[in-house]
Amino acid sequence: MISSLARLTVRAWAATLLAACALLPLVESTLWMLQAALLLGVQAGVGAAARRVPLARPLTVAAQVVVTLVLLTLMFAREHAVAGLIPGPDALRFFGQLLEQGGQDVNRYAIPAPLSDGIRLMLVGGVLVIGLLVDMLAVTFRSAAPAGLPLLALYSVAAGLTDNGIEWLWFLLAAVGYLMLLLAEGRDRLSQWGRVFAGPPRGRSRETPGAPAPARFGHRIGVVALGIALVAPLALPAMDGGLLDPNGRGVGAGVGGGGTISAVNPLVSLRDSLNNDDDRAVFSVRTEMENTSDLYLRIVSLDDFDGTTWKPSKRAITQVPEGFPAPPGLGPDVEFTEVGTSVSVAKWYGQTWLPMPYPPSRVSVGGDWRYEPVGMTLVGDHGQNTRGLTYEVRSLDVRPTAEQLAKAPEPPADVLREYTELPDSLPSLVHETARAVTDGAKSDYDRAVMLQDWFTLSGDFQYDTQVDVGSGSQAIARFLKDKRGFCVHYSFAMASMARSLGIPARIAVGFAPGTPQADGTISVAMRDAHAWPELYFEGVGWTRFEPTPTRGSTPDYTVQDVEDNGPADPARPSQAAPADPSAQPSRSTDCRADGSDPGSCASESPQAALDAGGDGPKWHVVLLWALAGLLVLALPLSPLLWRTRMRAVRLGGHGRAEEDVAPRVLAAWEELTDTAWDHGIVPDESLTPRGAADRIVRTGELDGDAAASVRRLAGAVEQVLYAPRPRPAVGLADDVRRAAAALRDSASRRARLRALLAPRSAVRVVWTVSDRWAALRDRLVALRPNWRLPTRQRG
């Protein structure tokens, strides 16, 4: 027969593997899971053997740590180990290099990422560390309840990185593994712990015939644990309601066509991406557009600027319309044609925003998508993304003239108000430089072109992916002084300067034109990812500008003399597509997509270009997080707070009149029995007060004044229960406090800590709620005899 300790070891191993299943969607291959299961089994076997010897608990854990290091060395660093087995300095140094490589791979690839050695070490090593913690807590130290914390950490990391709509499945697997540990702690111990939720019998039997005690109590524990895990997120901000959120939010909201898009920043680390040799193709595009150098695939617009970063505003989303409305601001005098574009997305690129030419007029795409009308973008709902999609977009090829832009009337007041807003923290140098650069301009169009030309031609700016711009609200000012950066820096700076001049501006994130291929398609690669400013002109609408030197293409309407046949300025972005199509992949060194975030274009992180560290978060954000922190602290401390309150009420909340004798004595007795219950002495309602007092004195090893106090209180209870006119009793509160102090002194440190933080008697709250619900049901049945409410079996 398998011993209870061996059974617990097996279940700890299984619980860790079930929680580790949440990591499966992160990588393409599942080979690492088989390796982790094998190494985890060896680790658990070493722990079981050490406990059977038996070794001291710290030595058991130390043996498992040593074996884990040896196993990882054999798998990953055998050539760098001493005798191919012992992890020496070279092996540890190699582990550091692998972990660094894994971190870079995580930032480089989309989910699911390829299983590189660095990622494999992070996955297998992480599972082994969690497995060691679970085995140590649940088996070596025989405390299964705290072992749920590392399991929760393993699940939370995976759930935070994935957005595939089935996080609930991984949660259930992790929860099943945790409950397996609880059920394996042993019949006697588990049944005693389960009574915290069941309590002693009250009137009628609470047991279901034939149900084994451990399973019965395990079910109760499971219901309470899962209920807390599902309901608690509803009270926390920024968690979108958890698993019970009625809207079932993905990126969009809910099952209908309404909802909102939160301000999720789509910009991720760009500098490392641009300096990486991997430049995989993201899209294969076929278009009817004549000038393919204007084919920018726009993902999302960033219009909310807080001084340190640009991000999308929180917008309402609707069902995708059959035909999109006309883009905002576009007048009838501007020439445009409707063109079709077909986009095929690589299977590894999981973008939750749909890349499209702007402005789109109609989209034909499969899947669950929602439409954001302000930015005219499509966003995936319930985990929908672009991975492997092929879709058709009809869009407007708008061709304004320089004259139309120069004569554009003033924008509407709401557009000016929303899209020229700047934070007070923005350095005055930004506005001063903008005015100096545009001195002498006669229109907003002239100012916009002067800003673009200053960045691309006359300002001596250099495109540099190695730049370290700085942090805080001074980052733009630093960039304007150093004049080195890449697309995010240029677009951030030009949009901020345009707003300071009263020109509505926002940032667009997406992909610059790719490379034409011999078969007539256009290959858009990772390094074609880009960010550019869009400025608003009434009568034309949102208009693209290109301030980044040598990147993208300069719009024709921003070139004053397009007939100039003089030598081309190498600093100005190209105006047309290459004359001869090339079959070679794009070698553009522009922004590229970082596959590590399905909801991101690989553009530079605003934290890298405009780090918020210099200004700090806003006061309302700090307040929300402070309240969330208080709530997180209050939830585990609620049993302690409830017991403290009940103790104060029972020992001091009654009058001193004759009619108050019985309530005061019974309240003091209830406090004494609950205190004994908190210290492991479960109440037995079959005993008389005197018998219960003797049991408390005997089990709690009380003597002297403490034992006398318990018996004196039992005598007062018998007076209340049996005497025609009970005598007033004095000093009952002191008797309870004296007995409680003696119970604490005789208990172990662990028992005292549990009685304080997780008192068993706190289950009375559950009983009270249950009784009130039963009373409510009875009243409803009495009011409407024909009603048939479901009955509940207690067990």
Image (cartoon, rainbow, N blue to C red):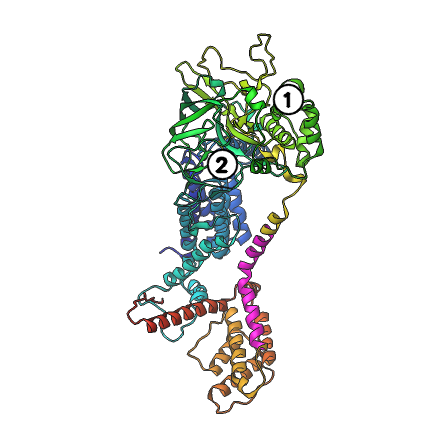
Q: Is 362 drawn above or below residue 665 in the view shown? A: above
Q: Is 654 drawn above or below residue 437 in the view shown? A: below
User: Can you tell which quarter of the image residue 389 is in?
Assistant: top left
**Residue 188 percent coordinates (x, y):** 42, 65
Q: Tag 1's secondary structure?
A: helix
Is 157 or 74 nearer to us in this picture? Answer: 157
Magenta stretch: includes residue 642: yes
Q: What residue type is labelled 2?
A: Val
**Residue 53 appearing in the image:** no
Residue topped by disc 1: 450
328 left or right of 183? right
**Residue 35 percent coordinates (x, y):** 43, 38
**Residue 343 percent coordinates (x, y):** 40, 25
Separation (CA) of disc 1 from disc 2: 28 Å
538 left or right of 198? right
Magenta stretch: includes residue 182: no
Is 643 or 525 nearer to us in this picture? Answer: 525
User: Can you tell which quarter of the image residue 451 is in?
Assistant: top right
**Residue 212 appearing in the image:** yes
On residue 194, the disc is none
**Residue 13 percent coordinates (x, y):** 43, 48
What segment is highlighted magenta in the picture? 625-651
Q: Tag 2's secondary structure?
A: loop
Is 74 or 408 nearer to us in this picture? Answer: 408
Crowding at mark 1 (Cα within 10 Å: few <14, some 14-19, many 20+): many
Q: Main secondary structure of the magenta part?
A: helix
Q: Is 235 drawn above or below residue 131 in the view shown? A: below
Q: Which numbered disc flags the more N-terminal residue, 1 or 2?
A: 2
Residue topped by disc 2: 374
